[in-house]
Amino acid sequence: MTELLRLENVCKGFSGIPVLKNIDLDVKAGEVHVLLGENGAGKSTMIKIMTGSYSKDEGDMYWEGQKVNIQGPSDAMNLGIATIYQELNLIPELPVYENIFLGREIKKNGKFSLLNKREMIERAATYLKRLGQDFSPEVLVSSLGVGQQQLVEIAKAFTVDTKLIIMDEPTSSLSASESEQLLKTIMELRSQGIAIVYISHRLEELKRIGDRITILRDGNTIDTLNVKETSTDKMVELMVGRKLEDKFPKGEFKLGEEGLRIENLRLKGSEEELNFTAYQGQILGISGLVGAGRTELARSIFGVDPIETGKIHVFGKETLIKSPKDAIRAGLAFITENRKTEGLILDDSIKNNMSIASLKKYKRGPFIHWEKIKQSTEDYTRELQIRPGNIEKHARKLSGGNQQKVVIAKWLATKARVFIFDEPTRGIDVGAKVEVYRLINSLVSDGAVVIIISSELPEILGICDRVLVMSEGKITADLLREEASQELIMKAATGGM
Amino acid sequence: MAQTVVEKKNEKKKGVDAKAILSKFGALFGLLLLIIILSLLTDRFLTINNFMNIANQASINALLALGVLLPILTAGIDLSIGAILGFSVMMMGLVVVNMGANPIIGILVCLAVGAGFGLINGLLLTKLRLPHPFISTLGTMNVARALALIITGAAPIAGFPFLIQYFGSGKVANVIPFSFVLVIIVAVGLHMFLNHTMTGRYIYAIGGNKEAARLSGINVDRILIIVYSISGLMAGLAGLVLVGRVNSAFPLAGLGYELDAIAAVIIGGASLFGGVGTVWGTLIGALIIAVLRNGLNLLGVAADLQLAFIGVVIIAAVYVDVLRQRPRKN
């Protein structure tokens, strides 16, 4: 097989923080090449460089043996690289064929003539046939299921001479049968000589369709292997195998009272009943892959999303939580994974952001006691070492780490006793991460109950005392720190127990 | 941008750069500039009498603008205020003139009808989950106007008692229009409400980031219902002033007033995307429109052309805002 795409020593950093350190990859025509790596290993960045969304800092790229410089998505498209992202880029209100030809419409004659609808419909139908589909290209995209929509997305690639299709976790939002259909389609594409770069966390899937696998860790490509000759265990080991350095300051606590007990909790639209208990003096980690239902669990506990059935006990007392307001009154705090969209009012001051959830505590008669707020905000800013220390500064202007500290301070101000952190260190640099861990440790020392949802295994193993693993809405493992290992967690998370 | 007066004080101490000052007092500078230019163009402009005239003329729009500021702060809009004004005054006329009720009861009816219609706006938005208040208030705008016309079969109601007339034509100390005093009282109250009560801060928070507000324990629906009720209440109050001035309630009262009110809010520096805007800015916005109208009148510019001037001012005011923000977003 001939070489199609090659990356040599590709590096990429963002504002001084290296994300890709040394990437080597070669993709051959007509193979399914799997990329495997933890969240944050650099897969997404790598794809964005291959598709021209990002430009590389260093290194070389070759296409069919020629050195190329991909500077934008249109360059990639012209070479013959198409990408299918997790989120589909379709316009639901338009028919399938118009989506397929969007931006590359066929006209009757010349630039300013009318659209040649019949030609587009006919061609769209042949593309769909190539994908084993026989639905009409004239139906609206919104009338299709997610699986079929994804095939429409793939059909877009046929409007140009596509030789490589990159798929970023394409099955993550599909049902089992839709996934099956997609895997068949991938095999079909391969037999037509199209190369696929495939990213997925589902190991069984990779074993079935992959020809070769390249493993990424910490922005480096670790190895490229033949899938047939590599065991699942070996893949996981290569993917996570790293000694934990002291990037994770671990506090020593004494096990205390029961803090948060979840009893037979059924999330909206789920059949699974979830049970677990979080204690004082024991940081409870919840691990699992993206989409395992961890965030949904946290949102339901906090009253953001409704629950079907189940009970929530806070410090031994059954508590009815129907809204975030109820949750806060019960002493809960929820530091969400998206601090910009859910945690902060970006164009408002540190002071206002920190006090918004606890204004009730700063009242004098009917009015807000601004002096008290100022005092308390300045205290938190100093205590948490938020920089810059000017409490009038707008949240937008802070670094990710400092933004996260503002969100944490907002919850400290509510005097919460149960803290649920969802991806507490996402997108913040290593130094700030350590500060966040120290903060969490001191919270626990002060008697707070802490639950940490994280997709980063080293983080879970580094700072948690107990780990729950979730997979497809179920809790598949409950491990104490001593018994937890990356391999065990990964297995439980991929459902491969 | 969404600066409270408390913040202004703090930043003044620190000696801020020219840009920050311009951003905070941009509308005020605009007003002063306008006053200076008009003073130079005509000597009939800069007199106490004329200024009191302007204050009186500005007051109805100012009250409506202060009301609609609240929905705009939450990233919403209220198109129904002009029509609510019309319906409120017709109800007041019905009660006071046709039924001979006590003027105080009439005033309360006028305010209650306004607030009630605002409440309906809030309920439509939050309980029916209509996608945007543009739709709910566009609907109630038409309904309120129709009701205003139906009540008397489109006939106006004239002859109001002194107490009601005082709201529109009364003068404090024989000089200052009572309507303007009312505006100042309302503005101070609203400023306190927005900046020094929890509900007020929640209004800004919802406009700044609705999702973050909800996750911070704010009952977003409750706050939005309050916001639209106040907007309606202020429409009723503006109607009271209008009836007091012309001594007549007519079904088309307030027709199109919502647009001038929204213009005043925007000229005053509020953002249609929510979370940004102040009471004082809005007040200055209303004054800019009134000063412009007055000055152009004195200069003998035809009313049709005045519209164009106001249009240009709206666009210019927002463009200045765009320029100011540009370097921030790269």
Image: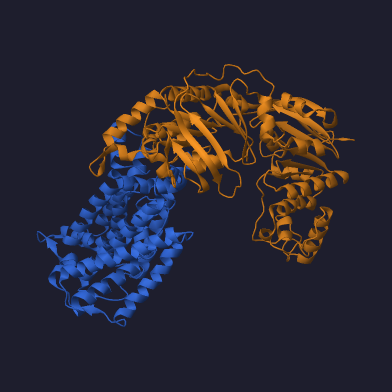
Residue that appears at 54% across and 41% down: A297
As drawn, the residue found furthest toward the right would be: A1
B145 versus B225 height, above or below: below
**Image quadrant where residue B250 sits:** bottom left
User: Nearest the camera: B248 or A41?
Assistant: A41
Chain B painted colour: blue
Residue B309: % across, % down: 37, 61
Write down the quadrant of residue A320 in the picture.
Answer: top left
B116 left or right of A274 in image: left
Point out residue A162 in the picture as x, y percentages from the top left corner.
80, 46
Name which residue lies at 52% across and 40% down. A263
Colouring method of the image: by chain
Quadrant placement of the C terminus of chain A: top right
The picture places residue B46, in percent across and down from the top left corner, at 20, 56
Q: Is residue A41 visible?
A: no
Q: Image quadrant of residue A428?
A: top right
Q: Residue at x 35, y 54 (%)?
A: B70
The chain drawn in orange is A
Q: Give the side of residue B100 with respect to residue A226, left or right.
A: left
Report the side of A153 relative to A423 (left or right): right
Pinpoint residue B103: horizontal percent, then vertical percent: 16, 70
Q: Is residue B148 visible?
A: yes
Q: Nearer the viewer, residue A459 or B89?
A: A459
Count of numbered labels shown in the rendering: 0
Q: Residue at x 88, y 45 (%)?
A: A191
Q: Could you tell whether B226 is left or right of A124 in the image?
A: left
Instruction: Report the quarter where the N terminus of chain A lies.
Output: top right
Looking at the picture, does residue A445 appear above or below residue A79?
above
